[in-house]
Amino acid sequence: MKIKPKRTFITQGANSFLRKSFVFLTCFLLASTVSIYAQNKTVSGKVTDALSEPLIGVSVKIQGTTNGTITDIDGMYSLSVKQGDALEFSYVGMKTQLIKVTSQSTINVILADDARVLTETVVIGYGTSKKADLTGSIGSVNSDAIMKQPALNAVQSVQGKISGVNIISNDSPGSTPTVIIRGMGTTLGGRNPLYIVDGFPVDDIKNINSSDIVSMDVLKDASSASIYGVRAANGVILVTTKKGKTGSAKIGVESYVGMKTVLNKVKMANASQYIEYFNQNQDLLKSYAKEADKKNFYNLAPASEQANNTDWYDELLRTGVFTNNVVSLSGGSEAVDYYLSYNYYDESGILDNQNFQRTTIRNNNVYKFFNDRLKFSQNLNLSFSTDRPKPYGAFNEAYRQSPLVGPKFPNGRWGTSSVDKASGIAGLEGTNMGKLNSIGNPLFNIDNSAQKSKTLSVQGGFEGEFKVTDFLKVNSRFGATKFYYKDRQFENKENAWLAVNPTKTSADYQASKAANPGKNNWASNSLRLEELETFRWVWEAFATFNKDFDKHHVEAVVGTSREKSGIGNNSVFKVYDVPEKSQYWSIGKASGAYAMDVEREYDYTPRALASYFARVQYNYDNKYYLSGTVRRDGSSTFKSNEDYWGTFPSIGLGWTISKESFMQDITVLNYLKLRGTWGKLGNQDVPLNVNQIYTSTGSANYNYVFGPSQSLVYGAAFGSPVMPLSWEVTREWGVGFDFSLLDDRLTGNFDYYNKLNTNTILKVKPVQNTWYEKEFYAHGAKVENAGFEVGLGWSDKLANGLIYEISANYSYNKNEVKNVTPTYDGDTGGSLSDGQITKRLREGEPVYAWWLLEADGVWQTQAEIDDPNNAKLGTPKVGHLRYKDQNGDGMIDDRDKVYMGSYLPTSNYGIHVGLGYKSFDFSIDGYGVAGNKIYNGLKHGRIDGGENITYETYKNRWTGAGSTNEHPGANRDSYSSSYFLESGAFFRINNITLGYTLNDLVFSGSKLRFYVTAQNPFMFTGYSGFSPEISGYSTDTQVPVGDPSRTAGIELTAYPTTRNFIFGLNLQF
């Protein structure tokens, strides 16, 4: 039989223990689960701002944990919590709130503005940082400020909002403002800051839709900018574009239409005033003429007998119209965030048939894997533009042309400056007519100018980010930019000839053409074609460490970068006799009867940059801060120099003194931080030919010795030395502090800085006692910029719900040349008809300061002129200006020219006032500069009496002995002097906006905002020209200008400042 095993005590005991343990564990787990469900609960609610508008993307998390969520499009959130947890609500620009969870299941929160942290998170090189953690000087503008000041180029929206940033506007359609940060240390074309868009460098941001921008952060000092090394001497502007956010799809629509007119139209003399001025000029000249020559002078008949009284500005100018339309789509999921926008801008300028159009498409995507541990992002910006510019010289011609000349003759032919000297009647058509002046017809030049340029800009990049641990991540990205420019200028040469020969016919021109075969000056037309292709690619890889060790916080970045850029093609050709319709404007359509002119043709001029960089940021208890940066750059621009590698370090210190225990009793003080920085920067943005010599082609010319073979190479011009050039180097130190008072309602900052450029590259002329004959590039000067910046702001909310803010900023900068190499002549000519020297580079003066004769009254009588004790220039006449004999040698020449100030302002400032009440918003912004001088080149050119003058010149002129000792008479000399130099100071209200917002219009969370904006409605200035805001040079083709000093600060053909009125709407749903 089968024997059953006997149960022993041990076996029975073990089974009993297991059963009891299982029952106990089961009961414990059930009890724990019940307890957990009893303690955990779901809390939900809505987060709004002070105006009860929902806040999207507010971080809601349990304090001390990573458990949390963000609010949706309606400001709603939901989170599982335990009773006793503390919920932390945080949002950029708002005060963080902590709310303890008790028995409530609904927690609605109203977040208040925090003025001190209005831009709490700012973008820095290769990362972001809290505003409170910064040791350097950074200014920021967010998308709200950009939206309230609509502009084609977002840089324009920064004007007046950041201290130390001087933005010089240019209101020409499609133009780019000039930006100068903390003064100008270079004298060549590379004086604009470095632009970084989503991590990638670009030449400028004129091809980016302003509505795509989230923020613009300006790195003003060396401590913040040194991570960009050899490219950062002029400051850095970091642009961050919009990305999608997890949640349902959102659609945005922006549309506005505007009108523009000239802000300040100069009042010119009318016909009767012009005739009086002209006749006085002729009478004076006749009195000095020899008897045989007196017959050459004549008087004009009274205005009542003249055929015309033309106001050329009324004829030339018109009301410009511009429109802007933007549509965007954004959203996201756990796998991908997306943003897509389309923008079309169309502007007709203030000149007839002047037009600019731009289409921009942007797509930003972020692909997420492994719970966001791995991300791939892709940015793409496409921009197409078509520009039909008109010659800005038309403004000059409208200023100078006589009111007695009509736009057209009665027969429809273009009017010319003709005059019948016998009768004194001007502006008539006839075979025996003389010339009243040599000025062209501005309306004809506008009509005959047929120019069309097109651009294509492609900017894109890919970036991968892998989060190795919670405190370490690595990034690698590659970006590229391709820019194409094609310009066609068509000229009807026959029409141009007929316009200045009103008595001739087309048959006359064709007869001359037939009589001069092969001579292109008799071609029917000409076509000038210019093509430009530029490129840039960048690869970067870097790792970021970010970790807290108790009260110690350390963040570090280390990486490498490779970049290549340059001109792929640049050519200019001119052909003749092509079909007139613009679709046939090509080289292949030329008749072939005339040889093609090649003005310029070269390709592939690259510039390469290899870099290594690192930055460490440390703070203890958010109280003591230390940051250090170093970048090592190797630039091919200076490859002729044996040492073309440079190291650019910086260091920054900070102390939040308000957190010290001894400061806690000062209740009025909420925040006070002291900062100090030092750093070294570089500038490689100089003309590509700085290391080239001047060459010639013949063996009879001088030669140059190259290499160890000592062989002679034909083509080197005598006296054009090859200098071992390197980058310009800037060393900067600064101190500052930030503060907030009275519950953060009053905020402010102060900075003092000193920048010294020790390697300034100049295009110099050799002095006469050297062997050199040609201009060349060399390290010729040291330039210092020193100054201070201050900003103040007040914001508050009244009991009736009115929210208001008032802010102002001011900056002072002293630009001074500290040293000039003595073997170089730093004098340079202005862009004036006489080509006279108007500026110079001298120690102790600003860069290219005005250097002019000092006007010292007016010659009142011939006896004064004949007095041998009075120093004279040339052969003066009564009514001419007198000039001061500065050195007392009894003569007037260039040695009597003296320093007369600079076109660079010493001060710039801005104001802002903002109001919000219920659904209304109102803002007003102003901007101004002071301490600069502008040369009125328009007024300078009025010499011979045949050209028109301003009403002011007519009214104030010298009319006889004792009438005035300040203003010359109807006849004057042509010398450049202080008489034409005027204060460039101005204050302009550059933006007034009133808006009204409708919330939850169609869907919950949707909003529609209507607004009206006035841009530049008022300007206060003593300058007598169109506008004192003159950049000095512009380049629409992105080719650096080698010598901007020649035109800087001189008004001749500058585009006038315009007054704009805009009506628009923003829709989000």
Image (spheres, rainbow, N blue to C red):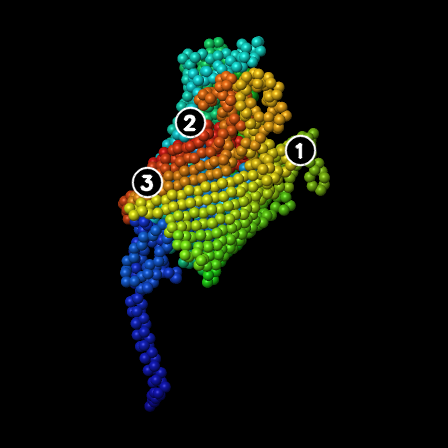
Nearest to N terminus: mark 3 or mark 1:
1
Q: Which mark is residue 981?
A: none
Tell me, yes or no, whether the two marked residues, 2 and 1, touch with CB atoms within 8 Å.
no
Tell me the residue at 32%/79% (across/down): 20
- Please give the residue where the numbered disc 1 appears in the rendered image: 772
Residue density around tag 2, few if under 14, some if 14–19, many if 20 or more, within 10 Å? some
Residue density around tag 1, few if under 14, some if 14–19, many if 20 or more, within 10 Å? some
Q: Is residue 260 above or below residue 862?
A: below
Q: 545 or 523, which is in the foreground?
A: 545
On the image, the x and y values in percent for residue 1039 come to 53, 36
Circle 1 — which element? loop
On the image, the x and y values in percent for residue 482 come to 49, 41
Tell me, yes or no, whether the two marked residues, 2 and 3, touch with CB atoms within 8 Å.
no
Circle 3 — which element? strand
Amino acid residing under circle 2 = Lys
- Please give the residue where the numbered disc 2 appears in the rendered image: 265
Count of number-bearing discs: 3
Residue 280, visible in the rendered structure: yes
Q: 702 or 761, which is in the foreground?
A: 761
Tell me the residue at 53%/28% (across/down): 978
The quadrant holding residue 84 is bottom left
Q: CA distance from mark 3 to mark 1?
A: 64 Å
Tell me the residue at 50%/17% (across/down): 960
The quadrant holding residue 87 is bottom left
Q: Which mark is residue 995?
A: 3
Residue density around tag 3, few if under 14, some if 14–19, many if 20 or more, within 10 Å? some
